[in-house]
Image: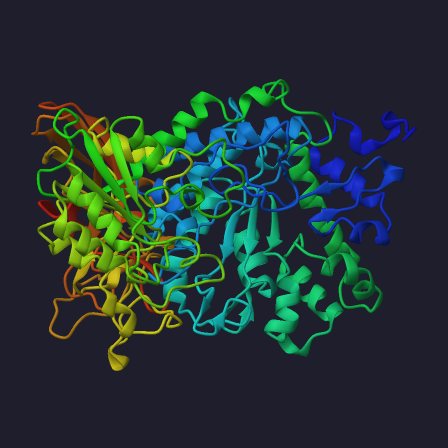
């Protein structure tokens, strides 16, 4: 542009990012400032400020959803990992972080080649409250602790620059590999259900549920993951649009949690607020002033760009509020090296660092680790020496695009189940249904004929994005169309063993298959990513021993008739007959419970060491707090103490468990540890997950797994008045499915 950049102060590397960002913003006119507030930032030529596109996605790989990223002949695709719900089923924190590292490496390589940006609006960390939600595929499941742990690890993988993970200086100066974004904040989990859509829905949520469930993953993402962006959602929360609520944005994310970054709207949220929610009868200028003052820094859309200047002229918002938001935005870009050049470790990344063999192998490993064995009548793994010919039937038997779900971009390649099995054994392929909808039974007979002829049969059934997706919630928990009939009829005539593989995000009521003696084994493969076929074949033939666990409860079909999807409370509503939601509050029968998963071997647990009590001495400024108890229940002299009143850093206890592989095959075991509150406390959770670890144990050997818990986070309850409390009394620590448990006493003394 012919500019002498050495004379422009915001380019002076000797100054702090905050000083440089302020100089840049202060150098702009109001008209120039508002043109930088949308996802398409127009730049300022006279200041040497280039254009920038903020919107890119990297949910489970670099995606072409969003205009910031593109694929072409130079970069035809990127590694497509399994959608999040299956990766979450691995319960493997190091895997989650490693995937983030690979995705950010590919993103940086594409940025160097001019094919991608540096800011990625991922991950989706909304808790799965209802099994009908269409976006379950994008999420880590129904437990807020698991969701928050996934968020922190994936964000660290995306953002951390090696050597700067524990940056001791000002965190607003911590360098970033790419910028991540935790979304959609908050209480967002209704897309489009029987005419109720996300653009009009008002989520009526108690303070108890907000603190305990809906906000916890976001707090963990900001505090533990140090995420550099949070996205607010379309819906209202208790009457107020999420992007216009200063308590949610400015007070909580920015204030209480100390976000080091920016807050962005879900795309066109301001327009949704204006025309969908018809918030306060606002004009366009009213709307942009409301959200800007609430703490929304960046608009994915055109409302800030088009209406903020006139909002200032009308006196509805201060220009200083614009300055504050722009400062947050430019500090993030400076941390990314957008102005100063990439970190030295990223400069040489290029074509060879996208879709590398190592990355594709990691995508395969992620699918293997997530696959859950739901049933096995001593049939799996199949012996290749015994079975030489297979019938592959069902609408997912030759799945390709369905395996990668949404926000997926272009994968490096596909390995379908048909491709993978055909390289190992002789295969007869008969889809049984023309598609997932399976609206007629005309193709079932051919599938039956194939099963009659071949030595073993594998049925691939389930759902896809035509059934569960963004903007599309489910109305039932059943397999679509004639799929159930196809499965039963094929299993009835099959010559050899029958294995059913379900591809889905949400749970499906397959009780019929679990009870059917003609179906020998069942696998849930989620949507297994670009190498899904290979991962499934590895599990079926025993090259990999499945160790995944369900991150959501699989409910029976009748659950959807017991309550509407729009009922937000997690706890049962007795007067309406509504059951509780998630494993923490639902007490009815299920198809498969949260955390369920089998293995080809057997594991046993033994408690090797554990503290059994914790003494908390209260001083005169720390008051005992009351709790709600069931009638006739024992009430301790000091029922509870407010968590914020005590020094939680000292309230830790350890649990060590020996995990022994009693079988003949090596395998991974996911050790799940829960806490159960003292008896008699009313309207609290049945149990809550407080720790998990995936551990490899060779056949006949054992490994010790050590957990360190903080009582304020692991034994706390949130009362209906919104207080976060540590209860006294006898808590119970449960390891696994309950075969190992022991009491843990908390003494509150004053």
In the image, farthest residue toward the right: 2
Residue 226, given in percent of the width and then of the height, sits at 51, 40
In this rendering, position of residue 689 left or right of residue 637:
right
x 57%, y 35%: residue: 171
User: 345 or 317: which is nearer to us?
Assistant: 345
Q: Quadrant of residue 735?
A: top left
575 over 541 or under it: above or below? below
Q: Quadrant of the N terminus?
A: top right
Visual colour scheme: rainbow
Seen in the picture, residue 573 relative to 327 is either above or below; the reply is below
Furthest toward the bottom, the residue is: 575
Residue 323 horizontal side relative to residue 71, left or right: right
How many numbered circles are shown?
0
Q: Is residue 551 visible?
A: no
Residue at figure coordinates x 7%, y 29% from the top left: 662
Tell me the residue at 26%/30% (across/down): 538
> Above or below — where is 264 with respect to 702?
below
Image position, residue 214 (x, y; %) = 41, 58
**Horizontal placement of 727 versus 158: left or right?**
left
Residue located at (80% from left, 42% from top): 43
Can residue 112 be spotted in the picture? yes
Residue 94, position as x, y percentages in the image: 36, 31
Give the camera-side residue of 101 and 327: 101
Nearest the viewer among 76 and 375 is 76
The quarter of the image holding the C terminus is bottom left
Residue 664 quadrant: top left
Tell me residue 77's x, y (percent).
55, 33
């Amino acid at each position: 542009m012919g500019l002498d950049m050495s004379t422009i102060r915001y380019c002076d590397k000797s100054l702090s990012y905050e000083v440089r960002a302020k100089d840049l913003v202060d150098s702009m006119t109001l008209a120039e400032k508002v043109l930088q507030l949308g996802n398409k930032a127009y730049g300022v030529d006279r200041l040497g400020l280039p254009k920038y596109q903020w919107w890119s996605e990297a949910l489970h790989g670099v995606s072409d959803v969003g205009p910031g990223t593109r694929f072409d002949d130079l970069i035809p695709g990127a590694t497509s990992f399994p959608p999040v719900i299956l990766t979450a089923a691995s319960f493997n924190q190091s895997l989650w972080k490693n995937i983030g590292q690979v995705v950010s490496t590919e993103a940086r390589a594409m940025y160097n080649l001019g094919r991608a940006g540096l800011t990625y609006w991922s991950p989706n960390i909304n808790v799965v409250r209802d099994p009908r939600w269409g976006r379950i595929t994008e999420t880590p499941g129904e437990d807020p602790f698991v969701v928050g742990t996934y968020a922190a690890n994936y964000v660290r993988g995306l953002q951390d620059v090696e050597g700067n993970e524990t940056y001791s200086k000002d965190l607003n100066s911590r360098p970033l590999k790419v910028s991540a974004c935790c979304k959609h904040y908050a209480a967002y989990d209704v897309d489009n259900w029987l005419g109720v859509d996300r653009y009009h829905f008002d989520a009526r949520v108690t303070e108890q549920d907000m603190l305990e469930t809906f906000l916890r993953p976001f707090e963990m993402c900001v505090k533990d993951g140090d995420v550099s962006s949070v996205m607010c959602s379309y819906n209202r929360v208790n009457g107020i649009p999420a992007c216009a609520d200063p308590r949610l944005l400015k007070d909580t994310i920015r204030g209480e949690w100390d976000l080091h970054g920016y807050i962005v709207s879900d795309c066109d949220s301001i327009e949704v607020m204006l025309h969908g929610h018809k918030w306060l009868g606002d004009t366009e200028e009213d709307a942009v002033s409301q959200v800007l003052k609430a703490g929304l820094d960046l608009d994915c859309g055109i409302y800030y760009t088009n209406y903020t200047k006139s909002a200032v002229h009308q006196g509805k918002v201060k220009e200083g509020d614009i300055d504050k938001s722009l400062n947050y935005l430019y500090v993030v870009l400076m941390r990314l090296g957008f102005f100063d050049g990439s970190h030295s470790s990223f400069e040489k990344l290029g074509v060879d660092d996208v879709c590398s063999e190592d990355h594709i192998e990691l995508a395969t490993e992620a699918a293997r680790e997530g696959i859950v064995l739901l049933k096995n009548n001593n049939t799996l793994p199949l012996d290749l020496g015994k079975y030489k010919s297979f019938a592959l039937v069902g609408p997912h038997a030759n799945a390709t695009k369905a395996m990668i779900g949404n926000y997926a971009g272009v994968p490096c390649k596909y390995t379908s189940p048909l491709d993978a099995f055909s390289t190992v054994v002789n295969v007869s392929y008969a889809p049984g249904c023309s598609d997932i909808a399976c609206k007629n039974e005309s193709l079932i007979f051919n599938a039956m004929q194939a099963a009659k002829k071949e030595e073993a049969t594998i049925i691939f059934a389930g759902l896809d994005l035509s059934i569960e997706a963004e903007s599309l919630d489910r109305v039932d928990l059943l397999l679509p169309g004639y799929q159930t009939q196809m499965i039963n009829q094929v299993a009835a005539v099959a010559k050899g063993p029958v294995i059913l593989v379900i591809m889905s995000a949400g749970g499906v009521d397959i009780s019929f298959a679990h009870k059917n003696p003609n179906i020998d084994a069942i696998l849930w493969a989620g949507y297994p990513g670009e190498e899904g076929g290979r991962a499934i074949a590895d599990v079926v033939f025993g090259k990999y021993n499945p160790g995944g666990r369900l991150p959501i409860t699989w409910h029976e079909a009748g659950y959807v008739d017991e309550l509407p999807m729009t009922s937000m409370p997690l706890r049962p509503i007795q007067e309406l007959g509504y059951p509780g939601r998630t494993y923490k509050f639902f007490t009815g029968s299920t198809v498969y419970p949260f955390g369920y998963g089998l293995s080809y071997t057997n594991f046993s647990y033994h408690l090797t060491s554990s503290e059994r009590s914790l003494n908390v001495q209260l001083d005169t400024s720390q008051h005992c707090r009351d709790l709600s108890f069931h009638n006739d229940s024992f009430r301790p002299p000091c029922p509870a103490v407010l968590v914020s009143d005590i020094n939680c850093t000292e309230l830790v206890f350890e649990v060590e468990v020996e995990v022994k592989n009693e079988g003949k095959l090596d395998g991974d075991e996911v050790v799940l540890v829960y806490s159960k509150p003292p008896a008699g406390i009313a309207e609290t959770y049945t149990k809550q997950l407080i720790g998990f670890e995936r551990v490899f144990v060779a056949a006949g050997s054992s490994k010790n797994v050590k957990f360190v818990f903080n009582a304020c986070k692991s034994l706390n309850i949130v009362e209906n008045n919104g207080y976060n409390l540590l209860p006294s009394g006898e808590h119970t620590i449960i390891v696994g499915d309950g075969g190992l448990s022991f009491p843990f006493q908390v003494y509150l003394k004053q």
